[in-house]
Image (cartoon, helix red, strand yellow):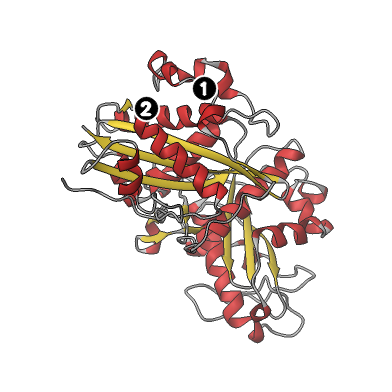
Amino acid sequence: MFRKFGVAIFLLVVVVPSMASESIEITTDEMNLYELIMQYRKENNLSRIPLSPSLTYVAQTHAKDAYDHYSEIPSGCNMHSWSAYGPWEKCDYYPDHRNAECMWSKPGELTPYKGNGYEIIHYRYPPTAGVCTPKSSLMAWQNSAKHNEVILNRGIWSDAEWEAIGVGMYKGVACVWFGHEKESATETTTEDATFSTTVPTCRSLSQPVPCPSSRLSTTLEEVRWSTDMYAKYSYTDYTDYAAFNQPIDETDYNVGLLEAAMFYETNRQRVKYGLPQLKFDYNTWVCAHNHSVDMVNYDFYSHESPVAGKHTMSDRFEQVGYENCWCAENIAYCPIGSSYVETARQLVAVQWMNSSGHRKNILNSNYTHLGCGAAFYREGAYMYVKATQNFLGK
């Protein structure tokens, strides 16, 4: 039978009407920078800021413009300046903020966003000297009092209520834009979220990589959510089970709760679009769970596995007893959210449902069964998850 393979990139696409229906794709680094900033705010008892497609478009546009034309910035002006080489008014930005409006007004010039935008920028000097990373950019802003005040609503920004944020990274430049106004619901084409990540396929590994001690992968025996509990709940009431709403504790996490939350959130999306719910299938769950664990243990991110006997999705389905089946696979990774439910919604509603290939898998009427797998891992001070959805048609 025909086998449908899930695509390996997340295209969380947003259409901003005034930009001639130009689609916006957020890269892995941009999404990671956003999540690092949100985690930093959380550590300081501040709320998350919704991602804005309009401000992200502005941030991405300025990051590239700053990289391409930094050498033409007039003497005495800084990197908040905009060149004359785009569909916007040239802006020479001086450190004394004498003409700050030319920068603040860029969201209104370029997008339907109804309000000013305020930028923090990090760059290598010159920008061509290297690449900004999410961690290096956040660290630079944390170590700069004025930039840190913007992120944490301190100093002159203490009365500001950030209702929107956009993130753009281009080689040696990283830009983040903040706004007081909420993104209008009419400005996006998605209901649940604005966009997700474009994730490059991870490098292929010819030899397995040993699991570092910092990894937090989970074997089947360690999954504490019992698989017979799937039948006790549905997408409408699973959050009544209090454990789903608890924070993910690195010292006592329960990967089974996240896998179940992903399962129920997937069915919530299907029902919303008039499709029947998928049934839980134990063998498909084993397939998904083991692939997530392998991606953590062997340090890769791909539908193609370096593990012997599991190189392709077909190999993995055959290992659990399904040959020549109608099947598909979605994968994703992201920093953990404030709870199992929030993390599941980030994966399902924000990432997969806004990627055309992954969305087609979720909303494919030929599939009848689903298994969701996850594995936690740590990078520095933050926890992440690698997740897998496996679909099966019986």
Regarding mark 2 in the picture, which secondary structure is present there? Answer: helix
Residue 201 lies, with reference to residue 39, above or below; the image says below
Residue 206 or 145: which is nearer the viewer?
206
Q: For the residues carrying marks 1 and 2, which lies nearer the camera in this image?
A: 2
Residue shown at the point (27%, 36%) measured from the top left: 392
Residue shown at the point (47%, 74%) measured from the top left: 87
Q: Residues within 10 Å of mark 1 (few under 14, many from 20)?
A: some
Residue 312 or 48: which is nearer the viewer?
312
Q: Quadrant of residue 377?
A: top right
Rendered image: mark on residue 225: 1
Residue shown at the point (68%, 43%) measured from the top left: 39
Residue 280 or 237: which is nearer the viewer?
280
Q: Quadrant of residue 42?
A: top right
| Res. 160 visible in picture | no
Residue picked out by circle 2 = 282
Q: Residue 283: x percent and y percent?
A: 35, 31
Residue type indicated by callout 1:
Trp
Rendered image: mark on residue 2: none
- The C terminus - image quarter: top left
Q: Residue 185: x percent and y percent?
A: 43, 42
Regarding mark 1 in the picture, which secondary structure is present there? Answer: loop
Residue type indicated by callout 2:
Tyr
The span from disc 1 to disc 2 (Cα, nearest Å) is 13 Å
Residue shown at the point (50%, 61%) measured from the top left: 57
**Furthest residue to the front?**
308
Q: Residue 282: x percent and y percent?
A: 37, 27
Residue 242 lies, with reference to residue 46, above or below; the image says above
- The N terminus - image quarter: top left
Residue 302 lies, with reference to residue 218, above or below; the image says below
Sooner in the amino-acid sequence: mark 1 or mark 2: 1
